[in-house]
Structure formats: structure tokens, C-alpha cells
Image (spheres, grey):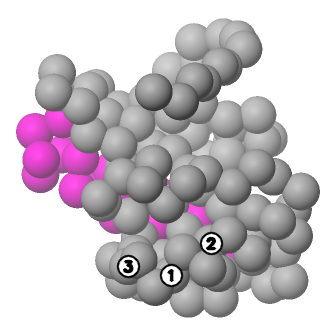
Amino acid sequence: MRKFQSEDFQVFKEWHEKRGLSVPSEAALPRLGLIEDDLAAGFLIQTDCRLGFLDFYVTNPDAPKKDRAKAIEEISAKLIEAAHRLGIKVLMCNTGFSSLKKLAEKYRFTYLGEYSSYSRGI
């Protein structure tokens, strides 16, 4: 596992496209991201109020499911550690994927309910 670099964006984009997911713009990605080559990536969004978000997770749909799951778990653990080191006091994550819901519960995130998300360019 290593820090996500701008040259990783192409494979990040390909994984989204293969899954039929919308691709976030490279400019929208947080500075702190991790990638497990050929398997998965995830990011930590930092805010100015000691609140952080785990987001922009994606896995390689062509990789074995067990390897993808392990990579996402390891990425999550490292991002949670980073959030702690950075002084983040509340860490949130939003997902519609059952596998990530289970992982959030494993890491003792509190379920806050379901809702709709919207975005708008500025």
C-alpha cells in the first residue's frame, strides 16, 4: 500500500468506469489517499472543524473479491490511523454498498440513517 499519486488517477478512473460508477474529477480528490496496486483505493477528506470523511473508495472489479476486501480493510485502518494523527475528532463515512456498511460497523462507526446526496459544481 502506498500514497495515491496523480499518475494513479487513470486506473482509479478505469475502476469506476468498469463498475458503471460516475468518476469524480481528479481535482475533487482529497490530498490524502491510499492505493493498493491492482486492488483498491480510498481517501480521507479533512475539514477545518476536526471532522473527517472516508470517501472515494473503489476497487478493481477484475481482482479477486477476497483480495479487494482485504485491501479495503487495510486502507480503512491506515486512513483511520491518519485521521487520529491529524487531530480529527469525528470520522464519518457514507456508503450504499453493503460490504462497506459491514466494514464501518466493524470499525465501530455509528449508523446515522439513510439519506440522499447531492452535489453541485461551483
Residue 29 vertical placement versus 93 (above, below)? below
At 38% across and 64% down in the image, what residue appears? 33
Instruction: Please name whichever residue, 114 or 17, is drawn nearer the observer in this view of the structure.
Output: 17
Whether residue 12 appears in this view of the structure is yes
Circle 1 residues within 10 Å: few <14, some 14–19, many ≥20: few
Q: Name the residue carrying label 1.
A: 8
Q: Is 31 situated left or right of 104 in this image? A: left
At 31% across and 34% down in the image, what residue appears? 52
**The magenta segment:** 68-88
Give coordinates of residue 2: x percent, y percent.
36, 83
Label 1: state its secondary structure.
helix
Q: Amino acid at mark 3?
A: Gln
Are dots 3 and 1 in contact, CB under 8 Å? yes
Give coordinates of residue 60: x percent, y percent.
75, 76
At 60% across and 24% down in the image, what residue appears? 119
Instruction: Please name whichever residue, 29 or 50, is drawn nearer the observer in this view of the structure.
Output: 29
Instruction: Please name whichever residue, 99 or 59, is drawn nearer the observer in this view of the structure.
Output: 59
How far apart marks 2 and 1 lie (CA) works out to 6 Å
Q: Name the residue carrying label 2.
A: 12
Corner quadrant of residue 9: bottom right
Q: Which mark is residue 48?
A: none
Q: Amino acid at mark 1?
A: Asp
Q: Is 79 situated left or right of 110 in this image? A: left
Q: Name the residue carrying label 3.
A: 5
Image quarter where the N terminus lies is bottom left
